[in-house]
Image: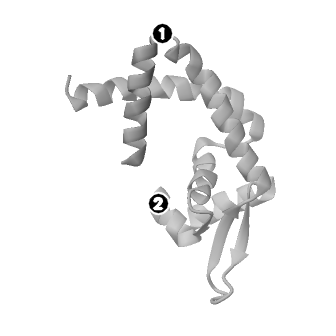
Amino acid sequence: MNSRVLSLALASMVPGVIRGMHLDFFSARRVTQTQFMMPMAVRSQKKRSMSDLAGDMKVSMPTVTGIIERLVRLGYVRRVQDAGDRRRISVEATAQGDQFIRDFQKAAAHRWSPVLETLDEAECRTLHKILLKLQAH
């Protein structure tokens, strides 16, 4: 099996799993999937500049500003002024934002469980090894 066939299989399966989570998780927290990606990006490096977030998410600065403003109001992130350059604004996750991400990870694990139960022990070990390798890429 080549990587193209595998990538198409993943591309067709993952949206269905995520779609089910959207109704249960994101809607209950009044957050879109796009808005959710910001705390994930912020948390990956503790503190991120607005311009770095815009570049990583491939969106404009006004878009990032709007998303961050909404997340600040929800209590998931906070803006921090750079001590060396007051014009530079960074964003960091709050304790509530960290909990939001942990809650998402639990919900995702719950959603994936029925899918993964079709695998035997050896297949689970192999998949885990593959996922760790992909995560490092």
Q: Are marks 2 and 1 in contact (CB under 8 Å)?
A: no
In the rendered image, the quadrant that contains the N terminus is top left
Q: Is residue 102 left or right of residue 123?
A: right
The residue carrying pointer 2 sits among few (fewer than 14), some (14 to 19) or many (20 or more) residues within 10 Å by Cα, namely few
Eyeballing the image, is 18 above or below 124?
below
Residue 26 appears in the figure:
no
Residue 93 sits above or below residue 119 on the image: below
Q: Nearer the viewer, mark 2 or mark 1?
A: 1
Determine the residue positioned at 51% across, 23% down.
Answer: 16
* Left or right placement of residue 91 versus residue 60 in this view: right
Classify mark 1: helix, strand or loop: loop
- Label 2, on which residue? 56
* Residue in the picture at 59% in, 42% down: 33
Dividing the picture into quarters, in which one does residue 75 lie? bottom right
Q: Is residue 88 visible?
A: yes
In the orientation shown, which residue stands out farthest toward the left?
2
- Mark sitting on residue 41: none
Asked if 94 appears above or below 126 in the picture, the reply is: below
Q: Position of residue 59 (x, y in %)?
A: 49, 60
**Pick the front one: 17 or 30:** 17
Amino acid type for the residue under numbered disc 2:
Asp
Q: Which structural element holds mark 2?
A: helix
Between 85 and 121, the one lying in front of the other is 121
Residue indicated by mark 1: 118
Disc nearer the start of the sequence (2/1):
2
Q: How is the image coloured?
A: one colour
The amino acid type found where label 1 is placed reads Thr
- Residue 11 percent coordinates (x, y): 38, 29
In space, the residues marked 2 and 1 are separated at their CA atoms by 35 Å
Residue at 25% across, 25% down: 5
Q: Quadrant of residue 3?
A: top left
